[in-house]
Amino acid sequence: MTGIRALPRTLPPFEDESLSSLIMRSARLYHFRAPMRVLKRSKVPHAWLETLAAIRPAPRLAEGIASVLGVSVATLDRLSAWGPSDRMASIRGVEVGRNYLPHRSRRSCSACLAESLHHRDWWQVGVITACPRHAQPLLRNCPGCSKPIYWRGSELERCGSRECRYDLRSHVYGGRPVQLACSTGLLDLLSEGSGATLEGSGLPFGRTVEVAHAVGTFVLGRPRLGYASSFVAGDPDRIAGTMEIGWAALQDWPQGFHSALDQMRVGAENRGKHFGLEREFGGFSEWLSKTSSEEWARPLRDAFGQYLSAQPSLRTTRRGLVRYGDPEVLRGGYMTRNEAADLLDVSSQTMIDLAERENLYAVAPVGAGVPSLLNARGVEELRARKAATLLKEEAFALLGVGVKAFDGILGLDVLEILPEGERITVQRMFVKSSIEGLIARVKSRLTPARAGAKLLSFSRCGGGRATTDLLRAVLDGRLRPSGLARKAVGLSAFLFDQRDVAAAFPAERSTLNLLEVAAELGENGRSVRAWARAGLLPTERRAGSLEAGSRVTSEGIAHFRREYTTATEISERAATTPRWATHRLAFHGIQPLLFEARTAIYPRDVITEDLLSKLNVKKGASSPSERAAKSADLTWRVGECVAEDLGVPLQRARSSLFHTETGTLVQVMVGRSPRIGASYAFRFSLAMRQSLDGARKAWLALALAEGNSFILLPWLEARKIIGGGEKPRTLFFLAADGQGRVRDEQMRSRQKWLPSLSTGTENQPVPP
């Protein structure tokens, strides 16, 4: 702060001196009666000395005070009690709650003043009640007038009262021995600096003061903590007694803290609470829960949780314990009836019945509106028992069977059902382990499948038999599963060899059902049912336990195989796929007998060896240059035929032919048939359209690449067919059959076939 000079003579501060002490000593040097006159040069507004020492001024004002006293700003910070916030003060840079510093009056040790006439900074901490060096309590009231010693005058050794002026150095303590453990420990921790923490709990100085105050208060049985400012302004003996108890609890961590908790629980039955942490520990648990978000309180919460976990008889609820961290504290605890009902997911009335039946009450209900407690361990056991039982729908879902099959399995007496008096809920009667055991028994009989075996599931190998018959055969050892389905569960996952099933059930059957026929033919069931409905597969109606419904005889299957062949069989003979075979047959004009079946079926006599040889003929992959060469050759051949038809010589220019004298223009377009279909695709560009529109005599020749044929149309007629307007390119198609003939009758009448390159004759196909 420029323009402010130091006092002509300044005093160096002591290492442990407070700011108020330095100001009073400076005032005495200049014989000022009012200490604040020393700071007149710094233009400090009118304020009390104790206020200036406790509340941080503006930065520029602090610089002025430092300049007047002849010290640095850092030294001024060390001397003062200014803290980082309104709630925190600072002694030698060590933070402590501001309310623990009674700044309106001063405390002193008479023996210390006699040795050195300055006020020690640690005397400001209200919970340090005695001087460890001289083993005597700090003076709060003047021995001469019994009034508080205020910050008045400039003589530190005298009472601040103008009428008294008692010399504090003359006081000699002659009372009983004082307790020094807390004061000594706190002073040592303060002297270690701002980074020091208490051994064991890891608490810094300021938090150590708070925790010792709280623990001591609740050990003494006081219902609430109260304000720190009221505490340090109270009876010195009460302060010392409370802090000594709290300090002892922080030693030998955490055993000392656990001993303090034991002392808090003494007289819990007289606190007027039915149960809960407040009944056991008074207000301590509530005070601790308010610090749950503070990182410094973690050691306290952990130690409290350890204590709770070691107290199986603690009368408190799960909700009361869970806030203190580790779920292990729930072990052996208690919970209310509503908490237990929520945990078990049962109604309140069911929980009441269970509590009485299972003897779960730790604190029995004594009247309306009075809560009760249940043993948490017993409730946890009930939850485990409930998890070990299943509802009916859960049971047959685990078994992988339907309701009807499940009812049949119940009749085998292989599943355990709980008596009604042992159930958690009435509906949960099936023991989960017995169902899993049944599945394990079936799985233990699993044997590797033989080569070429046809494996069937439970549902497909029944053959009119009930699931119970199959299961009984497995349990009796007459039938063994040979495989497992990957996505199925329970019994439905087991697969059986068809021959083993037939051997296990030797009952004579002369017919097969449609699913068995599908397995025999190697086809899907949907197609077989469609063939049966259409009369292609002869069926019979029979009655009986093993041959009910639509049945097929061996003669019927033989007749079907003689008369018909399927796309699956055709694809195997032609070395292709069923879908490809179906499309190629349609390409050659052969349609399936039945369209609603998934697998196409054809008369066997229609599928000849010559036709089979054509099914696997695929368009070979050719390069763009090869396709361009073929198109150019086809264009030239078409041009020769057109020139002969028109009777004029034509010259070629790319894909067009022209005769200049007559103004004739013939545009040749080559169409290709994609994949296995018979529709030829033609691409017509805007440049072609403009050329044809500008010619006097314009013709459009549509050449079919695979068919060696073309269609010649006058442009005026072709324009109506092509359409497209002014689009830059038009794509249109011509449908043709497997022989390359155009399907449209009008267009087919104009289709012309090119001569064969080898014979010179027209390459027109023979009608099928």
Image: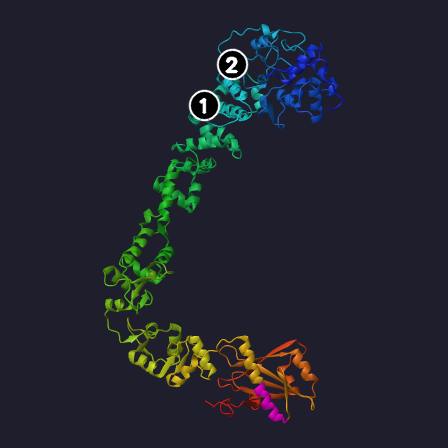
Query: Which of disc 2 and disc 1 is earlier in sequence?
Result: 2
- Using the image as rendered, state which of residue 702 and residue 263 is in the foreground: 702
Majority secondary structure of magenta residues:
helix
Within 10 Å of the Cα at label 2, are there few (<14), some (14-19), or many (20+) other Cα atoms? some
> Residue 720: horizontal and vertical position, in percent?
64, 84
Within 10 Å of the Cα at label 1, are there few (<14), some (14-19), or many (20+) other Cα atoms? some
Looking at the image, can residue 741 be seen? yes
Q: Which mark is residue 89?
A: none
Q: Secondary structure at mark 2?
A: loop
Type of amino acid under label 2: Pro
* Farthest-out residue, bottom: 647
User: What residue sits 37% from the left and 39% below the top?
Assistant: 377
* Farthest-out residue, right: 3
Q: Specify start and end residues of the magenta stretch as a single range.
A: 636-647
Up-down relation of residue 636 to residue 446 (above or below): below
Type of amino acid under label 1: Gln
Residue ID for mark 1: 251
Q: Secondary structure at mark 1?
A: loop
- Using the image as rendered, state which of residue 692 and residue 580 is in the foreground: 692
Answer left or right for 263 relative to 86.
left
Residue ID for mark 2: 132
> Residue 71: horizontal and vertical position, in percent?
67, 19
> Residue 286: horizontal and vertical position, in percent?
50, 31
